């Protein structure tokens, strides 16, 4: 069992995620992937339970809300994805491709806290054939335009790849699609099984990186920065287009040095082939009132600054407003980090700052 992945940052290697409990929907065992995960869970000696629906796991043990939350983050649910209509995924792609939902990471700021609400357990879907057939339909619909799919909207698929194998399958599917492209982002370094996938340059492999202060304080349960960078070098050498998402960008004491240092470390560590087709996406920290309430309950000691008085209110879709940095601060972050990126990687492309 992965102690590094439950207890947060450790100097050693971040181990592969092994759940404490696995649920199966009976129908998932009609699929080879479902059977394969079942055998894996048996071999690992993980307690196995059955559930009528992957959307209704209600009986997790634990004597407090927090204890149940922590266990949910280490509970895997194996099911059949019934909703095959994909959500949109602007600005990074046209569609979100649903390979998994939920994550074992404990990033305090993670928006899954709010979007998954009372269901923070991790779901993987075994009917990837049907999911990819749906992706094919979307690609055909938009031809001759290229259609991009984002695989990390509701999960961190790299961290689950040793269990499901779904990412490799999707990478190779997109490799065969003249008009299909895949992208995903990860905070995990377990990329070895993806290095020889036939990606054909159609998958952009992105790593989430941040200033040391942010990783140290807010990202327990994920791979260390050095592990992520080593993995980024490996995927670049394997010919994948590479990208970095700096998110959430957090205003903190010493942020200028923090982000300057981040870019310096990236510049020092990356091989030349990683810099040929390199993208950056920049996302400033934001929160909603609901997110703040949930984060404070789940991570009561968090140092995450969520003071509405220091932020600018931005009205969002469906009337749910969020708190972002005031224009002057946002502009300072954008301007400085852009400068650090271009001075380190003159050929890089910044896709957006939001
Ligand atoms: S690794 Fe990503 S998906 Fe997982 S908890 Fe952290 S931010 Fe959320």
Image (cartoon, rainbow, N blue to C red):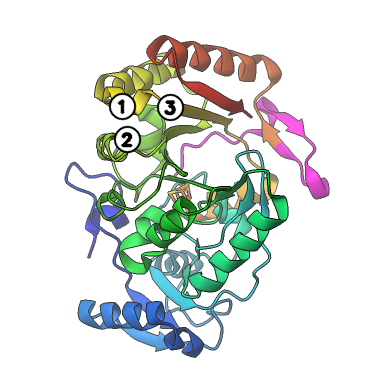
Question: What's the distance in space between the residues labelled 1 and 3, CA to CA?
Answer: 8 Å
The total number of labels drawn is 3
Residue 236: give its label: 2
- Outermost residue, right side: 319
Disc 3 is placed on an element classified as: loop
Residue 273: give its label: 1
Q: Is residue 307 magenta?
A: yes
Name the residue nearer the viewer: 258 or 138. Answer: 138
Q: Find out whether the residues at labels 2 and 1 contact each other: C-beta distance under 8 Å.
A: yes
Question: What's the distance in space between the residues labelled 2 and 1, CA to CA?
Answer: 6 Å
Disc 2 is placed on an element classified as: helix
Residue beneath the point at 40% across and 87% down: 49
Residue beneath the point at 57% across and 27% down: 351
Q: Which residues are magenta?
A: 301-322
Whether residue 253 sits left or right of residue 323 in the image: it is: left
How packed mark 1 is, by other alpha carbons closer than 10 Å (few <14, some 14-19, many 20 or more), is: some
Sequence-earlier tag: 2 or 1: 2
Whether residue 226 sits left or right of residue 161 in the image: it is: left
Image location (x, y in percent) of residue 260: 39, 15
Whether residue 168 sits left or right of residue 13 in the image: it is: right
Where, by quadrant of the figure, is residue 169 drawn?
bottom left
Residue located beneath label 3 in the image: 277
Where, by quadrant of the figure, is residue 261 drawn?
top left
């Amino acid at each position: 069992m992965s102690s590094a992945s439950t207890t947060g940052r450790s100097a050693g290697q971040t181990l592969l995620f092994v759940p404490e409990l696995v649920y199966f929907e009976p129908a998932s065992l009609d699929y080879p992937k479902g059977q394969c995960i079942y055998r894996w869970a048996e071999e690992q000696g993980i307690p196995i339970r059955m559930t009528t629906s992957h959307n209704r796991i209600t009986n997790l043990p634990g004597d407090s809300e927090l204890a149940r939350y922590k266990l949910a983050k280490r509970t895997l649910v194996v099911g059949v994805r019934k909703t095959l209509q994909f959500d949109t995924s602007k600005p990074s792609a046209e569609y979100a491709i649903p390979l998994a939902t939920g994550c074992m990471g404990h990033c305090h700021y993670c928006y899954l806290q709010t979007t998954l609400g009372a269901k923070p357990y991790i779901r993987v879907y075994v009917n990837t054939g049907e999911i990819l057939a749906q992706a094919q339909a979307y690609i055909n619909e938009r031809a001759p335009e290229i259609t991009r799919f984002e695989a990390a909207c509701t999960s961190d698929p790299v961290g689950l790849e040793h269990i499901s194998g779904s990412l490799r399958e999707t990478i190779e599917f997109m490799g065969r699609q003249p008009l299909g492209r895949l992208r995903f982002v990860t905070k995990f370094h377990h990329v070895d099984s993806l290095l020889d996938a036939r990606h054909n340059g159609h998958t952009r492999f992105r790593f989430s990186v941040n200033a040391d202060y942010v990783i140290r304080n807010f990202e327990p349960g994920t791979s260390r920065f050095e592990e992520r960078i080593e993995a980024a070098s490996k995927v670049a050498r394997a010919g994948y287009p590479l990208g970095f998402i700096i998110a959430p960008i957090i205003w903190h004491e010493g942020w200028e040095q923090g982000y300057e240092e981040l870019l310096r470390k990236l510049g020092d560590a990356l091989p030349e082939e990683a810099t040929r087709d390199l993208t950056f996406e920049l996302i400033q920290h934001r929160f909603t009132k609901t997110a703040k309430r949930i984060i404070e309950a789940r991570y009561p000691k968090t140092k995450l600054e969520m003071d509405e008085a220091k932020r600018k209110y931005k009205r969002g879709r469906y009337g749910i407003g969020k708190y972002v940095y005031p224009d002057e601060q946002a502009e300072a972050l954008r301007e400085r980090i852009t400068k650090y990126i271009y001075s380190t990687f003159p050929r890089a492309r910044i896709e957006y700052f939001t």
